[in-house]
Image: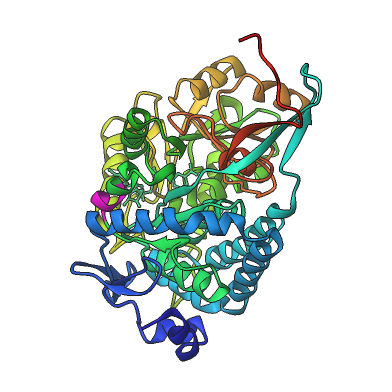
Amino acid sequence: MTTANLHNQYPSIAEFIAEHRWKACFYPGAWESAEREIPVFEPATGERLASVGIASAAEVARAGLRARQAQPAWAATPFDQRAAILREAARLLQQEAESFIEWNIRECGGARFKAEWELNICVEQLQMAAAMPMQANGELFPSSMPGRTNIWRRVPMGVVAVISPWNFPLLLSLRSIAPALALGNAVLLKPSEFSSVTGGLLLARLFELAGVPQGVFQVLPGLAETGSALVSDPCVKMVAFTGSTAVGRRIAETCGGLLKRCSLELGGNNALIVCPDADLDAASSSGAWGSFLHQGQICMQAGRHIVHRSVVAAYTEKLKDRAERLACGNPFTEAVQLGPLINAQQRDRVHGLVQDAVHQGATLVTGGEYKELCYRPTVLIGVTPDMPVFKDEIFGPVAPIVVYDDIEEALALVNASPYGLAVAIHTGNATRGYEWAGRIHSGMVHVNDQTVNNEFQVPFGGMGASGYGGRYGGPANFDEFTERQWVSLTSDPIQYPF
Ligand code: NAD
């Protein structure tokens, strides 16, 4: 069936979803069925919601060739037409918001407010990307050669592979796809196997209906082998990866060997410092939001609370109260702040970290228990910096508290982590907070706020084990998804000595 027929037959994404058109299908530029499939389960109930086709290594290779062929015409498409397609995608996303939100809640287990926030910011992301093609695309430089004009301009990377995780599946796919398309690249998306619909096939349908030409945007669901086939595919010139540090390191090694551009947004173990002069209501609110939002399954989760000895008792009590007020359940059928963890493996990992801390002498203030995949928000005191619950990324609703006596000690604890994604400092003296931020090895530092912050007009990214310096958002997107080219023009050919 051709794309045009599909468009006529299923005018709305909601109907398309209801028909489960992608059952064991994937989207290499048109809907195709695959030999193998991934089942899509709802974490809150265990119900099987759909199945999605796995793109094999051979299909990845074909998709790469198709994208390489389609990309030059897309890059040559007048800027206002590319902008119009992105605006149409934004309009459709808004129009079909409820379908996207529902899928996000059911497939990934997030609370409704989280899915709504994600949807809204994705609409903004598309609108911002739609403004990119009309921006100035280069500069003129002087020349020492008479009659020569030096032009420095941006050219697309070509084919960009986007590999994304499941925790914010729409956002973390779109933050790369939208600017990459806007700047004339073709995109091959590999969503997480735990969010193949929300972070993958819904987007395929969205861009198909918005009018992105065939082959320019393709979705290739699958497991690690599909991702690794994409990374080494010769047609792919850049990999934009968001996910764990372990997988990012492997991808960077392959890209290094092949001399491909590689943008990495990886894991984190983010600190929240509470100073003696902090507003403890605000600090504990930051602590609860930073640690428990989306069950703690966020790269910027506050996984280390570093609290001054003089306020630790009061801070712990307030954090405990906030934790105990949170309801955990099925976010699709109940009004809860926390849904289930993504799977049993993740729940057992989180529980293992908590139990290990308690065995090593930490005290459980609240939480530490679960029902099915719902893990109660947990606060631990008496934690020491050598415990895995403090050193490792938790990715669960756990707030380990470590005590400090001197700010130098607190800063040293923050900087002892190989990760460098987000840090928050609560202090009565914001100017000193700003000075301390300059001494912290972290891509993002928030004074009198919490760690989970994302604004698309501001470049976002981590340092060290959280990513090696690339940035998404605002002006950084131009650098991230284009290459620079020097073109010189001379009207009269230059004569050289020989
Ligand atoms: P993950 O690394 O397990 O998987 C991420 C993606 O990589 C998935 O699509 C997966 O299928 C794919 N993949 C796995 N092995 C691969 C391989 N060998 N080659 C190519 N692709 C491969 O991560 P996850 O569990 O989906 O997500 C959680 C992790 O992501 C956490 O560590 C979290 O901190 C991190 N994260 C980082 C950010 C950020 O912006 N820094 C945002 C969200 C999540």
Q: Residue at x 34, y 49 (%)?
A: 368
Quadrant of residue 419 within the rendered picture:
top left
The location of residue 287, given as percent across then percent down, is 56, 44
Q: Residue at x 76, y 28 (%)?
A: 492
Closer to the camera in the image, 164 or 181: 181
Color encoding of the figure: rainbow
- 114 on left or right of 430: left
Does the stretch in magenta take in 226?
Answer: yes
Vertical position of residue 121 compared to residue 154: above or below: below
**Residue situated furthest bottom in the rendering:** 9
Region of the chain picked out in magenta, as a range: 223-227
The location of residue 277, given as percent across then percent down, is 71, 29
Vertical position of residue 338 compared to residue 237: above or below: below
Vertical position of residue 153 compared to residue 176: above or below: above
Q: Residue at x 70, y 39 (%)?
A: 279
Closer to the camera in the image, 465 or 26: 26
- 56 on left or right of 438: left
Vertical position of residue 416 compared to residue 382: above or below: above
The location of residue 458, given as percent across then percent down, is 68, 43
**Residue situated furthest top in the rendering:** 497
Quadrant of residue 373 within the rendered picture:
bottom left
Give the prevailing secondary structure in the magenta stretch. helix
Does the stretch in magenta take in 406?
Answer: no
